[in-house]
Amino acid sequence: MTRVELKNVAKEQIKGKIGIIFIMLLIVLAIGFACAFIPIVGGIASFIITPAFGLSFCLIYLKLTKKEDIAVDDIFAGFYKTGKALWLKIIISFFTFLWSLLLVIPGIIKQFSYSMAFYVLADNPELTAREALAKSKEIMNGHKFDLFVLQLSFIGWYLLVGITFGIAGIYVIPYVNATTANFYNSIKE
């Protein structure tokens, strides 16, 4: 699929779903905000649940790409693999840090290599975190620049989010994430 096709399909997939996605985002923000006010324990809780929410969003956007219905409780779907999601986030951060020690550019390239790991784990929950990371590197081989250009094509939308003090994010966040899920689907085979 071309970049334009990925974006057009994403627009269709999120049509009529913006409200429910916004409610899910509010739930995550409220939980994160609550964690911020609890000394020490809140930081630890946030560290543990953030990857699970990330996995949940990957599951949600993959459901949208399959034209399946989504519900508000889907925001907690990633919690059934909290350990794997946390470990995946830790190893991605660790390896990206190590590559960044060489210089910034290798770290950025590796970040693109690892960028589909959560989608891989959401799509294949039986995989371990290391296997999901390896699969992400495999499917991103030859597609890192494609993803870079795809993300760069949203720069106008990101500027709009900034100009509207985040209000446009209600539409832009689902649009970008649905496009990324479609990108994952187009390269995974």
Image (cartoon, helix red, strand yellow):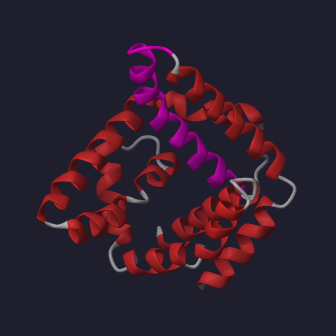
| Res. 29 visible in picture | yes
Dominant SS type (magenta): helix
- The answer to which of 60 and 32 lies nearer the viewer is 32
Where is 30 relative to 63, above or below? above
- The answer to which of 128 and 29 lies nearer the viewer is 29
Q: Residue at x 48, y 28 (%)?
A: 49
- The answer to which of 160 and 171 lies nearer the viewer is 160
Where is 41 relative to 183, above or below? above
- Residue 129 percent location from the top left of the image: 33, 43
Q: Which residues are magenta?
A: 38-64
Q: Residue at x 80, y 68 (%)?
A: 12
Q: Is residue 86 left or right of residue 125?
A: left
- Residue 64 percent location from the top left of the image: 71, 55
Q: Is residue 167 left or right of residue 105?
A: right
Q: Quadrant of residue 7?
A: bottom right
Tell which residue pokes out farthest to the left in this image. 102
> Where is the N terminus found, in terms of image quarters?
bottom right
Q: Residue at x 36, y 60 (%)?
A: 136
Q: Residue at x 29, y 57 (%)?
A: 134
- Residue 188 percent location from the top left of the image: 47, 67
Examine the structure image and report whether residue 48 is included in the region drawn in magenta.
yes
| Res. 1 visible in picture | no
Q: Quadrant of residue 140?
A: bottom left
Tell which residue pokes out farthest to the right in this image. 16
Where is 132 relative to 7, above or below? above
